[in-house]
């Protein structure tokens, strides 16, 4: 594939007010107008380049939005105060009472809880399906379906969505395909494969410093403007806006995303292979044993690899917990949720990030108790890291279980 997401970011050129190499930060919540009439027109949405109030937009947020739209190859983008602050307005903008969503059943716990427990209050119903089976997805579509929702690489099971196949289904049934691409920035470009809307939690790889929350919705200019409408825009009215100080700092971090993603992917691929060789049940889209390895390969921008996320099965919750505690003690990384940090982060999704999903459903989707999700860090010497993890596995008895 010839799409070059990192070049698109690199080619943007912004200068600060005084010729600075970084754009100036707009340190204001409100903006003056020379003429009262211009203020009126701006509220009506009729003046380009005029700022109104920072919940609507700010120069700093527009710079970051432009960089993210360039990365995904969409017309426009709107940043939000968190990933959920991007996801929830998008779905509420697209769906109203009586509408129906077909969603992957393996999605971020917060998104799952929103669709399962919250949107039914507004009479928006969701069918959760195995997104890797296109015939199952199609069978779930009803005359009320408006949205097809998935993650490119799912949290936490790392299932891979066939975005081209889903886009064809969306087109056939006149649905909007929304893809959360948080786990695979740069590696996968969903809009280039036919997705209508691409969402990220910027909190994760894109910012990469675990120092802020953030989110973005990338899509057509029409859709992005509809989200920001002062009359009925869900982003504008629900108010999960980002602060300019934050967007300027995320923009700066984004410039090294391509270097970081290559290193996350390289390290994760190394560890995944080594874990598998040890006989540990390992899930990583870069492994030939991954059921969707070929689907990922057919979609990827090769330079960035298969991403930094992998899971292993430690055999039981007790073993998973013991292993995570020991790995933290030995400074392999941190027992923490989230992803995309320079240090390796690990957690047991069944009792943390996916605990919103009832036990029976967890079992049905293959989310076992002993599952540990890793966000692999930027370690310079990954062989050393592997040896540290292996020693921890032996000490807590994970390795014997796997080999037995
Ligand atoms: C973290 C995450 C979200 C939510 O983002 P926040 O920034 O925490 O609101 C959504 N989707 C995925 C895949 C995530 O990992």
Image: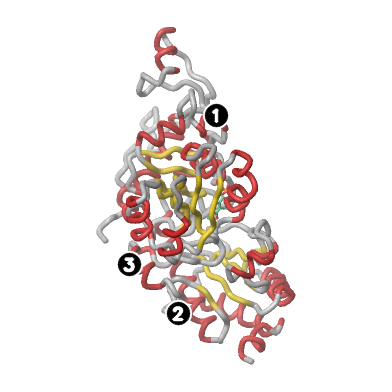
Q: Earlier in the sequence, mark 1 or mark 3?
A: 1
Q: How many marks?
A: 3
> What distance separates the C-alpha of mark 3 from that of mark 2?
16 Å
Identify which residue, 141 or 107, lies in the foreground: 141
Q: Secondary structure at mark 1?
A: helix
Q: Earlier in the sequence, mark 3 or mark 2?
A: 2
Q: Secondary structure at mark 3?
A: helix
* Image side of residue 357 versus residue 142, left or right: right
Q: Cβ of disc 2 within 8 Å of ligand 1? A: no
Residue 264 visible somewhere in the drawing: no
Q: Residues within 10 Å of mark 3 (few under 14, many from 20)?
A: some
Q: Is residue 206 above or below residue 293?
A: above
* Image side of residue 192 versus residue 332, left or right: left
**Who's the residue at 57% across and 32% down the image?**
238
- Would you name the residue on which mark 2 appears? 289
Query: Residue 318 — which label?
Result: none
Q: Secondary structure at mark 2?
A: loop
- Would you name the residue on which mark 3 appears? 298
**Who's the residue at 52% across and 24% down the image?**
28
Q: Which quarter of the rendered picture does the C terminus lie within?
A: bottom right
Name of the residue lying farthest toward the front: 143
Q: Is residue 84 above or below residue 31?
A: below
Q: Earlier in the sequence, mark 2 or mark 1?
A: 1
- Would you name the residue on which mark 1 appears? 237
Give residue 210's position: percent from left, percent from top: 58, 52
Name of the residue lying farthest toward the bottom: 404
Q: Cβ of disc 1 within 8 Å of ligand 1? A: no
Identify which residue, 265 or 195, lies in the foreground: 195
> What distance separates the C-alpha of mark 2 from that of mark 1?
46 Å
Give residue 297's position: percent from left, percent from top: 35, 69
């Amino acid at each position: 594939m010839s799409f070059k997401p990192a070049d698109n970011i690199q080619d943007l050129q912004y200068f600060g007010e005084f010729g600075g190499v970084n754009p100036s930060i707009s340190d204001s919540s409100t903006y003056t107008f020379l003429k009262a009439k211009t203020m009126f027109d701006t509220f009506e949405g009729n003046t380009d380049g005029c700022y109104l109030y920072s919940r609507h937009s700010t120069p700093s947020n527009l710079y970051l939005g432009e960089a993210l739209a360039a990365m995904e190859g969409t017309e426009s983008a709107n940043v939000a105060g968190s990933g959920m602050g991007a996801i929830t307005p998008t779905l509420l903008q697209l769906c109203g009472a009586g509408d129906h969503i077909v969603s992957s059943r393996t999605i971020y716990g917060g998104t799952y809880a929103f669709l399962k427990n919250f949107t039914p209050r507004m009479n928006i119903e969701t069918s959760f399906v195995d997104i890797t089976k296109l015939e199952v997805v199609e069978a779930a579509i009803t005359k009320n379906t408006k949205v097809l929702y998935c993650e490119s690489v799912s949290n936490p099971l790392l299932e891979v969505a066939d975005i081209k196949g889903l886009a064809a289904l969306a087109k056939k049934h006149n649905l909007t395909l929304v893809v959360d691409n948080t786990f695979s920035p740069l590696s996968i470009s969903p809009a280039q494969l036919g997705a209508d809307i691409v969402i990220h939690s910027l909190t994760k790889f894109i910012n990469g410093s675990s120092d802020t929350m953030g989110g973005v919705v990338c899509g057509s200019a029409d859709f992005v403007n509809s989200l920001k409408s002062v009359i009925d825009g869900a982003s504008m009215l629900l108010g999960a806006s980002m602060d300019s100080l934050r967007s300027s700092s995320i923009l700066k971090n984004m410039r090294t995303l391509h270097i970081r993603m290559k290193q996350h992917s390289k390290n994760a691929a190394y560890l995944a292979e080594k874990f598998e060789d040890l006989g540990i049940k390992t899930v990583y889209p870069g492994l030939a044993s991954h059921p969707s390895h070929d689907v990922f390969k057919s979609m990827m921008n090769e330079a960035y690899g298969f991403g930094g996320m992998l899971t292993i099965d430690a055999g039981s919750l007790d073993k998973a917990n013991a292993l995570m505690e020991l790995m933290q003690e030995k400074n392999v990384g941190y027992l923490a949720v989230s992803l995309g940090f320079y240090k390796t982060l690990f957690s047991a999704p069944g009792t943390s990030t996916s605990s919103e999903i009832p036990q029976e459903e967890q079992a049905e989707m293959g989310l076992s108790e002993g599952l540990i999700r890793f966000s692999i860090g930027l370690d310079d010497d990954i062989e050393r890291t592997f040896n540290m993890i292996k020693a921890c596995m032996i000490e807590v008895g994970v390795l014997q279980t796997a080999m037995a």
